[in-house]
Image (cartoon, rainbow, N blue to C red):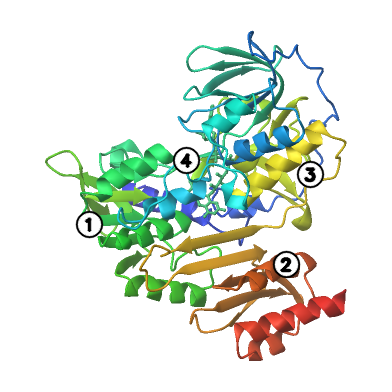
Amino acid sequence: MSQAWKVRRFMAGVSNSLSLKHGLSLWCPSSGSLDRAPLQPWSVGFRSFRRSYVAASSAFANENREFVIVGGGNAAGYAARTFVEHGMADGRLCIVSKEAHAPYERPALTKAYLFPLDKKPARLPGFHTCVGSGGERQTPDWYKEKGIEMLYEDPVTGIDIEKQTLTTHSGKLLKYGSLIIATGCTASRFPEKIGGNLPGVHYIRDVADADSLISSLEKAKKVVVVGGGYIGMEVAAAAVGWKLDTTVIFPEDHLLQRLFTPSLAQRYEKLYQDNGVKFMKGASIKTLEAGSDGRVSAVKLGDGSIVEADTVVIGIGAKPAVSPFEAVGLNTSVGGIQVDGQFRTSVPGIFAIGDVAAFPLKMYDRIARVEHVDHARRSAQHCIKALLSAQTHTYDYLPYFYSRVFEYEGSPRKVWWQFFGDNVGEAVEVGNFDPKIATFWVDSGKLKGVLVESGSPEEFQLLPKLARSQPPIDKARLQNASSVEEALEIAGSSMVMES
Ligand SMILES: Cc1cc2nc3c(=O)[nH]c(=O)nc-3n(C[C@H](O)[C@H](O)[C@H](O)COP(=O)(O)OP(=O)(O)OC[C@H]3O[C@@H](n4cnc5c(N)ncnc54)[C@H](O)[C@@H]3O)c2cc1C
């Protein structure tokens, strides 16, 4: 098998992950057919169980911790807030993080964080959780005030389930009463042997990655973005904001292939092109080439052609960060740690939330992992409420995806779309992208999913109601609607008639 073919296959695999068509994780690398795994009775029964806590130490003077969250990202920040709301944080909760920063709203990293330096880019502490949902900004001082122990830059490297202990990179031994795994994902990388680790080649998962990219952008002239999913689209929009020569390369036929219809993608592609972005579709990467200074200097494609680049950003998906928790029980179809509708793993007292959790997607009767900030927030709140209160109901998530680009000051056209539901069945498009456009997915006469670009707050609020209620819809009426407003009115009235 040729190297180019292998890489093409690899790229196609990870890029497919950015799709809803066959799964729910727009961000996750997983095979389409497997992502649709129906709910199965667990091989190991989930026991309804609350561990008797080890002795809690309000000053954490010993190695016993009542509640430990591993991972200091989006889900951890929202989980901490829920602990505080229940009066269960002070002296009882410890967060162990790989990063140097308190939890923050990660989506900012490829949006306002990458604004050109003269356009007021976002920086910490501005976007600590929970500002993304209108909540309090939880700075490092907030955690101190709330009596939450934060261990920074000390990733967990091992777990002993029997002894209920964690080992960290620095050698700490942490005994936990209940453990919440919130380790998220790590960015998929190109192999070192094809240049995946060259200086000037970037992957974006955390603030350190984004800072490293910014230091490259400051000197860059030619940027290549590999991947036509969210990360690729957002980074490309940022790079042209820096007035850099920007080329996006991906193996599919159009942008965001697993969510956008070809016709919808065409609108966005045209907008990107009008902003100076070049696309190379259906293309595979053979190697990333180094120049005489050892930095990346070009991208060699499968057909032998060369694209010059001093900065390359790889956005080809992510993998659940399950190591060192594999013993807790992984899902073999969608990856990640298997949990039930209250985020309990098969090991009593151990929970998993956010990107890393493989949970029952009740609405569509299948197991899914969702790499999306809305799920990170909701899963954290649901899990901690179930752990600390009498709440017993099952998590019932409605898939929701969004993106916002070209939002910097002075940008001629801002983009903000939202999608709710499932993109199955026939797609009906309404509107001209001036600036509004909507796509409705209709299956067996019912509205299953809807995407709107540049909606008003009221219109965006209608979308989850439509996707959740799946009203019967007259497709012909939708098709004849003369505007997005009229089409949403038709959909809204179908919902009213239904109820
Ligand atoms: C650049 C970027 C842009 C995004 N944009 C959007 C968007 O526009 N919309 C959207 O909905 N979603 C977006 N997402 C996805 C969203 O950010 C994630 O779904 C969300 O952050 C998941 O939260 P989490 O807490 O599960 O994982 P994370 O926020 O990734 O947090 C996991 C944390 O665990 C830490 N960790 C990992 N292993 C260990 C260990 N062994 N020990 C200790 N700590 C560990 C990590 O360092 C990290 O701090 C984006 C993601 C990225 C990377």
Q: Which mark is residue 125?
A: 4
Local secondary structure at mark 4? loop
Mark in the foreground, 4 or 2? 4
Q: Give the residue at x 56% y 38%.
A: 184
Q: Residues within 10 Å of mark 1 (few under 14, many from 20)?
A: many
* Residue 340 horizontal side relative to residue 376, left or right: right
> Residues under labels 1 and 3: Cα distance?
49 Å
Q: Which residue is mark 2?
A: 467
Q: Amino acid at mark 4?
A: Pro
Q: Which residue is mark 1?
A: 222
Quick check: is the Cβ at mark 1 less than 8 Å away from ligand 1? no
- Between discs 3 and 4, the one toward the N terminus: 3
- Between discs 1 and 4, the one toward the N terminus: 4
Q: Amino acid at mark 3?
A: Gln
> Is the Cβ of the residue at disc 1 closer than 8 Å to that at disc 3?
no
Up-down relation of residue 20 to residue 387 (above or below): below
- Between discs 3 and 2, the one toward the N terminus: 3
* Residue 137 horizontal side relative to residue 192, left or right: right
Local secondary structure at mark 3? loop
> Residues under labels 3 and 4: Cα distance?
43 Å
* Residue 419 horizontal side relative to residue 384, left or right: left
Q: Which mark is residue 40?
A: 3
